Image: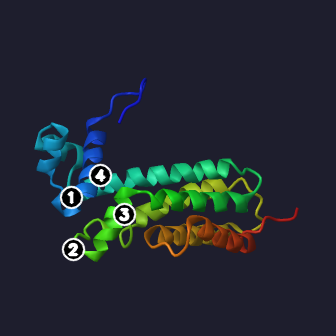
Amino acid sequence: MTTTGAAPTSTRDRVVDAAVRMTIDIGWSRVTMVRLADEVGVSRQTVYNEMGTKAGLAEAMVARELERFLGVVTLAFDAHPDDLVAGIREATRTVLELAQDNPLLHAVVSATHGADTELLPFLTTQADNLLATAHTVVAERVAPYDIGLAPEQVDAAIDMVVRVVLSHVMQPSASPAGTADRLAWLVERVLRPSAG
């Protein structure tokens, strides 16, 4: 989708957009390069040239969604430059709210109850790149705060936060605000900023 004044959407973006729509509408197992080509109005070879393989297409879809999620993380920290716990609380809440209303994520997670589980590993067992990217972004956002902990302790705490939030994205156990409050309570005790 383009907006006034925006650059035209690339073929790659159009293919990913179509793959997202098709995954939501008919399920990932029924998404094929031929169907994508028909949907986008390009040749099948163009789809292969842009995406490589179906696994490459899945990775591109996950990467785009991750970018959206990390965008709200950045905004949450920017809104609380002097309060790390508030930044983490807001980042957690907004990520979980975005997840709650994300039709692609629902299509992937709900597939676990049927046979179409091919996309799920990109969010779980094969999520190394997703976790590493999220960890890097959160670490960059946490770095300016005066925490008073050794770098390896901060790194371990960030890893814990990222993994806990991802687990709640996949399987929520409370409201986004409730989960955010619980995680903020924990973070306040682990990453308590130094008193000076």
Instruction: Give me the residue at 42% from left, 61% from top.
Output: 129
- Tell me which label, 3 or 1, sits earlier in the chain: 1
Dot 4 falls on a residue whose secondary structure is helix
Figure quadrant of the N terminus: top left
Question: What number is the disc on residue 26?
Answer: 1
Three-letter amino acid code at disc 2? Ala
Residue that badge 2 annotates? 115
Q: Position of residue 100 (x, y in %)?
A: 46, 61
The mark closer to the camera, 4 or 3, is 3
Three-letter amino acid code at disc 1? Ile
- The span from disc 4 to disc 3 (Cα, nearest Å) is 12 Å
Q: Which image quadrant for residue 108?
A: bottom left
Image check: 6 left or right of 24?
Answer: right
Three-letter amino acid code at disc 3? His
The mark closer to the camera, 1 or 4, is 1
- Tell me which label, 1 or 4, sits earlier in the chain: 4
Residue that badge 4 annotates? 20
Instruction: Give me the residue at 33% from left, 52% from top.
Output: 60
- Tell me which label, 2 or 3, sits earlier in the chain: 3
Q: Which image quadrant for residue 87?
A: bottom right
**Dot 2 and dot 3 residues touching (CB under 8 Å):** no
- Tell me which label, 2 or 1, sits earlier in the chain: 1
Image check: 29 left or right of 178?
Answer: left
Question: Is residue 121 visible in this depiction of the protein?
Answer: no
Dot 1 falls on a residue whose secondary structure is helix
Disc 3 residue crowd, few under 14, some 14–19, many 20+, Cα 10 Å: some
- The span from disc 2 to disc 1 (Cα, nearest Å) is 13 Å
Dot 3 falls on a residue whose secondary structure is helix
Three-letter amino acid code at disc 4? Val
